[in-house]
Every structure is written in C-alpha cells, then in structure tokens.
Amino acid sequence: MASVAIRDVRKSFGAAAVIHGVDVTITDGEFVVLVGPSGCGKSTLLRMIAGLENITSGAISIGGRVVNDLPPKERDVAMVFQNYALYPHMTVAANMAFSMKLRGAPKDETEKRVNRAAEILGLLQLLERYPRQLSGGQRQRVAMGRAIVRDPQVFLFDEPLSNLDAKLRVQMRTEIKELHLKLKTTTVYVTHDQIEAMTMADKIVVMHDGLVEQIGAPLELYDRPRNLFVAGFIGSPAMNFLKGVVRANGKLEFERPDGSRLPLAAAPSGSDGRKAIYGVRPEHFVLAESGADAIIQVVEPTGSEIQVVAKLGAEEITAVFRERHQFKPGDKIRLMTDPRLVHLFDESSGQRLIA
Amino acid sequence: MKLSSLRSVTTEAKLLLIGIPLLIWTLLPIYHLFLFSISPKESAFSGKLWPDHPTLHNFAVVFKQEHYYLQHFWQQLWNSLLIAVATGALTLFIATGAAFAISRLKVMGGRMVMNLALFTYFIPAAFLAVPMYRTMGLYGLLNNQWALILAMVTIATPYSIWVLKQASDQLPVELDEAAVIDGASPMQLFRLVYIPLMAPSLVAIGTYALLLAWNEYLYAFLLLSKDTDVTLPVALGNFLAADDSPWELLMTTGLIYALPPAAIYYVFKRYMVSGLTAGAVKN
C-alpha cells in the first residue's frame, strides 16, 4: 500500500517523443484510471511505473521512494496483463505461487497465500488446472490471483478486460471494484473504455497524445470537462458540439450559423462575437414547444432509453430520452436545452469558457 | 457419380500414381539391406526377392564379432553412441544459450551472430574437411574423439541457433515481463520459464544434432584412425577394402545401425515437425 507520484515524466523511443511531461499524484489506496484513445501513452506510462520501460526524464516515486533506476523486482508492484500472460506449462496454483517460489519462500507460507487469493477470486476448484483448460474470465482471475499473492504496494492493470466479451466485462468490472474495496491496495488501471473508467475510478486521468488533458473524479470530469477532448471522450453517447458565436449584448445567447439561438447562463466578460463551441450532453435535450426545430434521422431504442439522431438545423445531434416516445425517422420535434447544464468551449483552443 | 467426388477420385488417383512409385523407390534400398541381412552368403547376390533359406546367422556373426572386420563392433557402436550423444548435448547447450541471449536478452551483435551462422553454410562441410583436419592437428586433438565431437558441433550449431531463435521469437514477450515483475533473474527466467516452453524445439534440435553425428562418415574417417576409436560407419567403410567383402555382413551391420535413429524418430515424432517449424509462420 503506497502512494505513487509521477513528476514531469517524459518518454522518447529514440527520436520519437511519446510522453511530453506528465504529472500525476496517486494517494495511498486510491483507484486511479488512466484513460485515453489508442496511442495516447497510457500503457507506456504504466509500464514505466512497473519498470518495464526506461524513464527518459522526470521521476516516478512509489511510497515516497524514487524508483527510476530500480528493476521491477524491487519496486514491489504487481501487474495484470491484457492477455493474461499466464505460464502455460504451470498449473493455476503454480502460476500464482511463482513469485514466492522465485524468492525461495517457505512452502506453507506460499500455500496459505495462494489459497487465500484463490478463495477471494473463486478459484479453489481450479488450482490444479492448466491455463489452456480455463475460460477467458477464469484466466483473468488467475492473473489477478497471481498479483494478489504478491501482496504488493501497487496493483497495475493493463487493459485487463479488453479480451473478454461484453457481458463478462461488466461482471469483471464489478469484481475488480469489489476486490479493491476489500484489499484497499493502491491501483493504477489503464483502459481505453471510458465506461470502465467512470464506473471504477476514484480518480480519472484522461490522456491524449502523451499529455494529461484532465485529472479528477469521474463526475467532475463528466460535469465540468476542461476542454473539448475530455468533453467528447467522457460520456456515451458523446456530447454534442454545435458551432456558433456568443452573443452578449442584452440577452446572453448562443447564435448558430443559421441564425437560430440557444440559451446560455454565463460567459466570460467581453465574449460578445466570440467564436465558440456549444456543448450539450444527449440527455440534456428536452422536448419543448419553445425549442428549436429538429428532424429525426435515426431512432435507436436500447430498452432503458431511446437514442435519437436528429438534424438540428444544419448540424446532426444525438439526444437521449428516458420516456418511451413514439418516434419515427422523419418526425419533426422541438428541442430545448437547459442553460445551466450546457458547456461552452473556445473554438480555437478548445478550452472551457464557463467557470 | 457426382462431379465433385469424381474430381476428388481423379485427384487422389493422380497423387497415388506419383506417391506409390516414390514410396517404392525410397523403400527399395532399405528392403535391399534387409534382404541381404537375412540371406546366407552364397545366395545373397542371387537376385531373388526373398531368400530360399532366410537365416539370422549374419546377425549372430555381427553380434559375436566373429569376422575380422567386425572385431570391435560393440566398441565402435559405443563410440558412435558416445559421440552422437555428446554432440547432441553440446549443440543443445550452446544453441539454447545463444538463442535465449539473442532473442530474449537482445544482446548486441545478435543479428551479426545470426548472419554469420547462416554464412557458415555457404561452404559445404566436405570442403572444410581438410582445414578441419589441420585445425585439429594444431590443437593436438587428432585421434581424439573430442576432435569429431567438436567438428560435428561446429557443423550442427549454426542451424540449431537459427531454429531455436526463430522458435524463441514465438514465445510471447509478456511471459518474460510477467516473470520479471514476479521477481525472476535472467537465470531463473531461463530455467523456469524459457526451457520448459521451448521443450519441443529442444527435442527436435537435440535429435537433429545427435543423428547428424550418428550418420557422419567423412569427418569420422578423417579425424579418427585407431580401430578402437572410430565410429561404426568408418568401420563399415573398411569392409570395402578387401576383394571379397562380406556384403551380407555389411548390410546386416548397416541395418542394425539404422535402427536407433528410426527408434528415436518414432519416439519423438510428435516433436519433430512442431519443433522444427515453430516460428516458421507467425500465428
């Protein structure tokens, strides 16, 4: 159990710089998720914490100790890999006991730890099986068991659920979260799936092209994204972005290219005439007589809600309704936004404009 | 008959037309060996497909060392075995270490070693026989069985390194990483993870090197001279020195000598193809 501090870490592979200065603080016992699209550097950052990649510059500390030059063995971390990385020639029990065997730990101590981990993960019946005889979910549990037996300071997960089918993924998500609540070990979890990030994290680090876009609690990122990238990445279906100009003379409104106006509650002073992006989450559209005209293109009912793709003027938006409306493609509806729930971003920099 | 089954019958007929003659062609020398070994001396060359009076007398002569040329049969068989096993073991030892170092530890100069290894096969082993003789002479190893062992290891190792390196590349890197995070030193990684996973390839290569030495004639002939030091193929070669070579004994000994390789191949047949082709195609 320990804190992890990442201070101005940079990474280059030869001449190619992939991480351009990342600062993240992880407190003891926290579950932190590094999330971002493919190639953003999250796996590389995780591997640098583990010691599988060198740190070009900057410092990573675990438990207050700078670990830049320490081999993985001495960092007291355990890693769960995307494709499990179980030793195929060893039984489940031997896989989980491997780290203790390498250390020359006494047999009864090893057995105790392996049984405890197997019990937590429901693997007691499978201890004598070989990895090839297990399903994907079982293999992933064995990989987690291997990490638990280590009893490390930090758990590192590298997209562990990517190879599982959708239903199993949802189940394992909960299991991992429960595991964390039980063991309370500091965890760094890498994924490209923002739903995993939202449901599991105490704190999310959104990464993009080797930089940190925003760090915060899940709902904080959801309600107050700092820039266009975070706003579009977090939340599914994604936030709608409408182009236009802020009008602040008299009534505060957002004017779209076709002349129609959408309500705004706040804007930085001197914004009149400023080019901006109006962000609306799909669930924040309401049907209202005073709203703007929209024509429905596609209706996607998921059972718990109805997703509608509609043309709001010239731009296409996605709206989500919990009530069962009888929509058909081609229907004309009127959509209204709540000015307190909308987001405003500068068009050129992408930065958030409303505090 | 349906068109598709007619076509498949025709295809099969064509393949059999090629396959059966090929099989007969391949088996004919072996049958010849067998035929001679069960024929008595007088009727060996009669040209019959099966001897009138098949006998096991030849085998008895060989096993009891009752002929002049077979005086040291058991000693020579033992020499063959010793040299073959030593070659296999030494080649495995060197090639496994080299493959691990080049593939997993990614040592500097790894690629150069691989290329040099291939390079050694540009020159046929037969051309190198005389230089090898001279080299062994310089080291004072002539007439010492180590000369043959080292020569065979030299010939077998480059190919072995290549095959083992290719097979190593097939092992997922994540296994190494998992082991390193679990706390394995390179030696522990080698012993506990690498070797068990490479087992099929190791069996295949070990067998390859062993049989290479078992079947070697030229180098054995050149580098060893004492009758009690030579391997069985060389002794068999001496059979042909006289005018009235006992062909039936020659064939009998040859048949006996061919049995261990056949047995080894049969026991390890599971590994032979998988071990040698591991890494040939990316999966």
Image (cartoon, coloured by chain):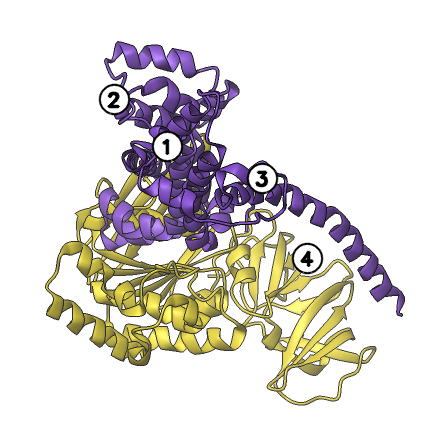
Chain colours: A yellow, B purple
- Is residue A10 visible from the viewing direction of this image? yes
Amino acid bearing label 4: Gly
x and y percentages locating residue B121 in the rendered image: 49, 23
Locate the N terminus of chain B and report the quarter of the image it occupies. Answer: bottom right
Judge by depth and name the residue closer to the eye, A47 or B257: B257
Q: Quadrant of residue A189?
A: bottom left
* Residue position for label 3: B29
User: Circle 1 sits in a helix, a strand or a loop, which is it?
Assistant: helix
Q: Nearer the viewer, mark 4 or mark 3?
A: 3
Judge by depth and name the residue closer to the eye, B130 or A92: B130
User: Circle 4 sits in a helix, a strand or a loop, which is it?
Assistant: strand
Check if mark 4's residue and mark 3's residue have beta carbons within 8 Å: no
* Residue position for label 4: A244
Q: Quadrant of residue A77?
A: bottom left
Amino acid bearing label 1: Leu
Q: Nearer the viewer, mark 3 or mark 2?
A: 3
Label 2: chain? B
User: Circle 2 sits in a helix, a strand or a loop, which is it?
Assistant: loop
Label 4: chain? A
Q: Nearer the viewer, mark 2 or mark 4?
A: 2
* Left or right, residue B38 beside residue B48: left
- Is residue B108 visible from the viewing direction of this image? no
Amino acid bearing label 2: Asn
> In the image, what residue occupies the spot 42% across and 54% down?
B267
Sequence order check, earlier mark of 1 and 2 = 2
- Same chain under badges 3 and 2? The reply is yes
- Same chain under badges 1 and 2? The reply is yes
